């Protein structure tokens, strides 16, 4: 009986003629996400620079004292970078590579997400996917996007590290394409894909730990307080904190691998190629706190980027729905 009922449902013409009130086109989905990614990257790039400078200072040393900043005051480092002689330009180091890394990641992630979502949605009796299903698609698509964006991430990390190195060992990379060409010639594909496993893990964990708490809290706040303007920012603030503490260990290890010189004598620490041995190596020199240095600028970046994304995407989505003639109850 269940088998016959299932077959009748799928054979019903209503199942295939059903259309949701509104769905963004590929162009709309990509346009909104790329716009928000570009603006968000501009806004958060100084904190990315501060975070990576903290990583660089703490490598092989760990935290100096237990504090809310995990031993490194990001506001002090922000001022130090600003006062090195380059002003805000120093804080925006690696912006070109960062924009390409974020843009390529978003492009690949959203294309894959929408393709899988559109393919799976008609098979569901409710004509939509569960939140768990959406999170799984987002995690997979984010992992693929991380692979594509990894070479740009390598360039960005190395550019940001350069000013803190001794002048004789600085890489002095030029534009992004020139930098990728040099890395490819000097280190091959291994250099361009340095830290890619941890970059994938970072993307998967960040997508999951950001979206699950955010959606849960947003719904909870709505049920308790109604439709208030503060629901989304508060939900995002908590979700960003959860995502930060879950994600920063992967980002920390990714940074370590991406900034390494092929000549091990130039590195402060030369890491084992085996993942487990490398993690034990870090634990022995820096203890567990070494994975969490830079947590404050990472949180600033995560929250600011997420808030920028939600504001821009929600504004454009609502505008497109109105242009499509949707009634208020359909939006």
Image (cartoon, grey):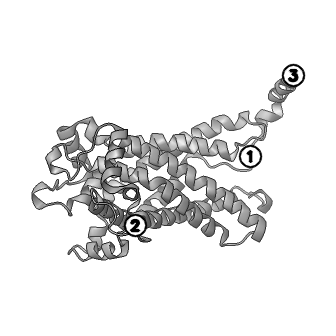
Q: Earlier in the sequence, mark 2 or mark 1?
A: 1
* Residue, disc 2: 70
Q: Residue 201: x percent and y percent?
A: 46, 44
Residue at the (32%, 43%) spot, across then down: 278
Rounded to the nearest angstrom, the CA distance separating label 2 from label 3 is 61 Å
- Quick one: label 2, few (<14), some, or many (20+) residues within 10 Å? many
Q: Residue 318: x percent and y percent?
A: 66, 61
Q: Give the numbered dot on residue 228.
A: none
Furthest toward the right, the residue is 1
Q: Nearer the viewer, mark 1 or mark 3?
A: 3
Residue at the (58%, 38%) spot, across then down: 115
Q: Residue 116: x percent and y percent?
A: 60, 37
> Hey, which quadrant is residue 42 in on the image?
bottom left
Q: Residue 48 or 148: which is nearer the viewer?
A: 48
Q: Residue 215 or 98: which is nearer the viewer?
A: 215
Q: Nearer the viewer, mark 2 or mark 3?
A: 2
* Residue, disc 3: 4
Q: Is residue 32 visible?
A: yes
Left or right of residue 189, residue 117 in this image: right
Left or right of residue 4, residue 34 in this image: left
* Residue, disc 1: 20
Left or right of residue 280, residue 244 in this image: right
Rounded to the nearest angstrom, the CA distance separating label 2 from label 1 is 48 Å
- Under circle 2, the secondary element is loop
Is 217 above or below relative to 4? below
Q: Residue 97: x percent and y percent?
A: 32, 54
């Amino acid at each position: 009986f269940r088998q016959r009922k299932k077959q009748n449902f799928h054979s019903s013409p209503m199942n295939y003629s059903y259309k949701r009130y509104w769905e963004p086109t590929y162009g709309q989905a990509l346009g909104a996400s790329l716009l928000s990614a570009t603006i968000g990257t501009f806004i958060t790039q100084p904190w990315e620079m501060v975070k990576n400078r903290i990583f660089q200072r703490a490598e092989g040393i760990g935290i100096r004292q237990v504090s809310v900043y995990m031993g490194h005051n990001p506001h002090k480092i922000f001022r130090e970078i600003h006062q090195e002689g380059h002003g805000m330009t120093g804080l925006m180091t690696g912006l070109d590579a960062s924009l390409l890394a974020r843009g390529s990641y978003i492009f690949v992630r959203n294309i894959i997400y929408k393709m899988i979502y559109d393919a799976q949605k008609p098979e569901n009796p409710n004509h939509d996917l569960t939140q768990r299903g959406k999170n799984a698609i987002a995690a997979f698509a984010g992992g693929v996007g991380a692979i594509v964006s990894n070479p740009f991430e390598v360039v960005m990390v190395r550019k940001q590290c350069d000013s803190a190195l001794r002048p004789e060992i600085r890489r002095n990379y030029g534009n992004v394409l020139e930098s990728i060409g040099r890395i490819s010639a000097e280190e091959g594909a291994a250099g361009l894909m340095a830290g890619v496993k941890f970059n994938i893990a970072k993307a998967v964990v960040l997508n999951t730990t950001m979206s699950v708490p955010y959606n849960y809290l947003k719904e909870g706040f709505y049920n308790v307080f109604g439709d208030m303007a503060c629901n989304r920012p508060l939900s995002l603030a908590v979700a960003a904190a959860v995502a930060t503490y879950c994600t920063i260990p992967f980002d920390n290890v990714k940074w370590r691998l991406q900034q390494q010189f092929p000549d091990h004598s130039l590195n402060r620490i030369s890491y084992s190629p085996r993942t487990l041995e490398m993690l034990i190596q870090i634990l022995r020199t820096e203890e567990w706190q070494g994975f969490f240095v830079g947590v404050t600028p990472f949180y600033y970046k995560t929250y600011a980027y997420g808030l920028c994304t939600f504001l821009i995407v929600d504004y454009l989505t609502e505008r497109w729905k109105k242009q499509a003639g949707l009634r208020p109850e359909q939006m």
